[in-house]
Amino acid sequence: MKEHLVIFDTTLRDGEQSPGASMTKEEKLRVARQLERMRVDVIEAGFAAASPGDFDAIQSIAKIIKGATVCSLARSNENDIRRAGEAIAPAARGRIHTFIATSPIHMEKKLRMAPDQVVEAAVKAVHWAREYTEDVEFSAEDAVRSDVDFLCRVFTAVIAAGARTINVPDTVGYSVPSVWGELMRTLIERVPGAEQVVWSTHCHNDLGMAVANSLSAVLAGARQVECTINGLGERAGNASLEEVVMAVRTRSDLFPVQTRIDTTQIVPASKLVSQITGYPVQPNKAVVGANAFAHESGIHQDGVLKHRETYEIMRAEDVGWAQNKLVLGKHSGRNAFKSRLAALGIVFDSEESLNAAFARFKELADKKHEIFDEDLQALVSDEDITPEGEYYKLVYSHVCSETGETPAANVTLTVGGLEQKASGIGSGPVDATFKAIESIASSGAQLLLYSVNAITTGTDAQGEVTVRLARAGRIVNGNGADTDIVIASARAYLNALNKLQFPDRLDPQGDV
Ligand code: KIV
Ligand code: ZN
């Protein structure tokens, strides 16, 4: 009989800490619904004290998610814990995840606290958290560089104070599988009360070993893995959910655990997160990369045709890869549109937004006869709604690009509802369009990344553009999709400018 492995998804918290991956409330709700459909056990929905926007998103997720525990991160201080407690209050099952750093370097240089003060703050934090929920998780940030005796001391104290899950993070992605497994084994052996709690592992991928380290911790007794879709996360990212889940399932001969994940929802989740954050998935990424099940060499193709298992250890359909399906066309009605989107986890809060999306669908169906699920997802994410509404909006664009001539663009935008026109020239039509937009917006933002991907196949496919902008230390991604890539580019640029209007967030790894 296999034990249950808790899948704790932190795409909406640690994943969102990737530069430019910040999501709007509506986007977070869509991701949360998909995580629920995939049957993750815990959704870390954000860090309530970071900003009013984070608080609001966690509370909204807590209201609608019934099939998973909804969790908020909180530093070990009273204000953070109370904000987290209020944010998760509407949840059917709510968790507070509190943390404090335990390594000498973090305690001395960042927290400027003595070890005794750290233990005291951790215990107080767990007591405050228990006023809101029995489900309290404690993390020792930078456990990887902490003294093992001190870790045992902190964990013993927080278990006595009422923590139910003890998380051991490799915050800086420094460990290797043998060492990480050994640490988990030692902690479980040495900490009094270890058998009353769930041991958890949280690994970053700086040396490319986040998944391997997590799996080693599972073999050593961890029964919760903290991970993200597509391995999104701070710096090189977190352990990737899809790799952990498929490793445990595919090598069930090795792992004494099983998850309750509906693996057929993995690829849809990966595509959704990639589309919303603008972080593309590398083609050779395990499980969810476009080439993960493609066989190029003749020998492999021949083998797979004769007997699939010659070169395939997993089935593409088991992780949700399906042939691009023609789902809707120009004659499809509003109800078919609405129910297909509902099947993709996209639910509209008002008739007005449904009607607006349906109008965009009809426009797209006129230009592109075959509409796939990916087109529908882009169509909706394209209408990215910022809390302030769309401050910059594209009304009209015209570009002129001729061999031997300098490309030129004319654009008309509404800026806070008022129409403004401008023109620009550039090294190409996209450059000219961005210059025209900038001559209106004067944002002063620096363009860090511009990328175009075809959403589906064929020359009539929509191009999906990601633009990453930086200003005054803030980095945001904007997305836009259209069959015309210059228009898609203009939309992506404006989407990023709209996001720059958001207030700044606190740094979740910051001081206590
Ligand atoms: O990496 C880390 O240490 C974290 C903690 C807050 C769990 O994300
Ligand atoms: Zn982390």
Image (cartoon, rainbow, N blue to C red):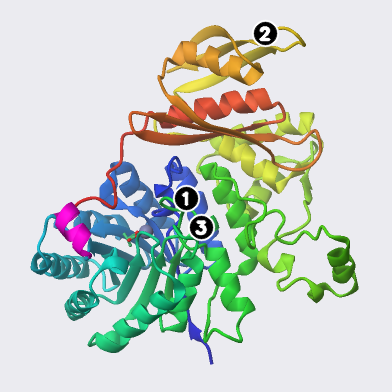
Q: CA distance from mark 2 to mark 3?
A: 42 Å
Q: Which residue is mark 1?
A: 29
Whether label 2 touches label 1, CB < 8 Å: no
**Residue 398 magenta-drawn?**
no
* The magenta segment: 103-111
- Nearer the observer, 261 or 146: 146
Amino acid under label 3?
Gly
Of all residues, the one furthest to the bottom in this rendering is 1
Q: Alpha-carbon neighbours of circle 1 within 10 Å: few (<14), some, or many (≥20)?
A: many
Q: Which residue is mark 2?
A: 406
Q: Position of residue 439 (x, y in %)?
A: 48, 11
Question: Which circle's residue, 2 or 1, is located before the other in the chain?
Answer: 1
Amino acid under label 2?
Thr
In the rendered image, the quadrant that contains the C terminus is bottom left
Picture layout, residue 277 above or below residue 10: above
Q: Which residue is mark 3?
A: 231
Residue at 56% across, 63% down: 37
| Res. 163 image quadrant | bottom left
